[in-house]
Image (spheres, coloured by chain):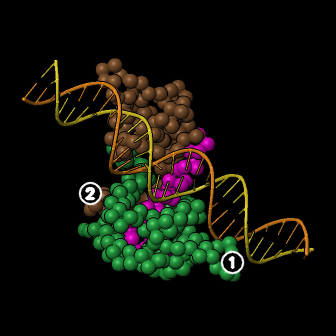
Chain colours: A brown, B green, C yellow, D orange
Amino acid sequence: MKLLDEYISIFIHQTDLTLTSYIKKQLAPYNLAPEQNLVMMLLWEKDGLTQNEIAELLVKDKTNVARMLFNLEQKGFIRRACPKNDRRSLIVYLTEEGKQLGNHIIPLTEKFNELVKNGITNEELKELKRILTKISHNVT
Amino acid sequence: MKLLDEYISIFIHQTDLTLTSYIKKQLAPYNLAPEQNLVMMLLWEKDGLTQNEIAELLVKDKTNVARMLFNLEQKGFIRRACPKNDRRSLIVYLTEEGKQLGNHIIPLTEKFNELVKNGITNEELKELKRILTKISHNVT
DNA sequence: AGTATATGGTTGTTATAGCAACTTTAGTGC
DNA sequence: GCACTAAAGTTGCTATAACAACCATATACT
């Protein structure tokens, strides 16, 4: 498409859509959406983060994170508890089911990452990150 | 963030979010959302496309396009008419207001594109597109 | 102590994004 | 000409994304 060639931002956007669409289908059988998976990946690394910490780590609006966590709680993958010393915040814990889920999902995301990088050298990856970083800085 | 460094797809996703967020704010005063703007850019190039053609050109689901066009119609930028030879389809036309809008938005998007490309050589841009294309093909 | 401010979460609204199921209309095959 | 299939749009559902406004609790400052 012409737009896609003229505007690099649209090119990046389309690539992102393609990638998201793929991983979404991979995760669907596990009842997990792509961004919900990012939250889970944080928790598999370090259980017991607060909502706010998750929002900062994912560079996301706290409203989105709150809603994602609500959904993950509904699905039974996490639970939220109020710490005694600060009744404003909520700490997020994995449930047993949430912990088990990692055994399936982590290999799946590793495989996805390998697929994405297929045929691309480390040099190229570094170059890609370097240019994307430059682009981000240009508008920030 | 660790996730961002380990998974190139997340890196791309974050870059896209940053870009989208920026252009969204630029377009907001004109009562136009980023994806709505893509539709308008197509129409400024070629008025009188069908909904289906727009969906194909933008590589988007027809349901999204239908809803975007509904919103653009509500805003008064386009109108939709049924061609006599095929009562299933809808042809999309710019209104006078929609045409006028282009005078403001097109320069704005050009400026945005220049900003995004700031400090990046044509070689780097080509390289970026090449690698992103490879990545897209890997999951398609 | 008491006001002011800051922090952590929630709710509401708008805009993508894509799937499934559906309606209406057009074209095909016999 | 009738049944079948294909095509174009619409509706409903779930999941992001971000902003504004809000509530409750903590902290700071006087």
Quadrant placement of the N terminus of chain B: top left
Which subunit holds the residue at mark 1?
B
Secondary structure of the residue carrying tag 1 is loop
Which residue is at the front of the view, B3 or A50? Answer: A50
What residue did someone put label 1 on?
Answer: B86
Q: Which residues are magenta?
A: A1-30
> What percent of the width, then of the height, locates residue C3?
17, 30
Residue D13 against residue B127 in the figure, above or below = above
> What percent of the width, then of the height, locates residue B113?
33, 70
Please give the name of the residue rendered at 35% of the width and 22% of the height, measured from the top-left corner: A83
**CA–CA distance between discs 2 and 1?**
48 Å
Residue B44 against residue B130 in the figure, above or below = below
Which residue is at the front of the view, A75 or B93? Answer: B93
Which subunit holds the residue at mark 2?
A
What residue did someone put label 2 on?
Answer: A140
Question: Can see residue B117?
Answer: no
Please give the name of the residue rendered at 52% of the width and 47% of the height, measured from the top-left corner: A111
> What percent of the width, then of the height, locates residue C28?
81, 76
Which residue is at the front of the view, B108 or A79? Answer: B108
Please give the name of the residue rendered at 33% of the width and 75% of the height, measured from the top-left corner: B104
* In the image, residue B109 lies in the stretch drawn in magenta: no
Figure quadrant of residue C5: top left
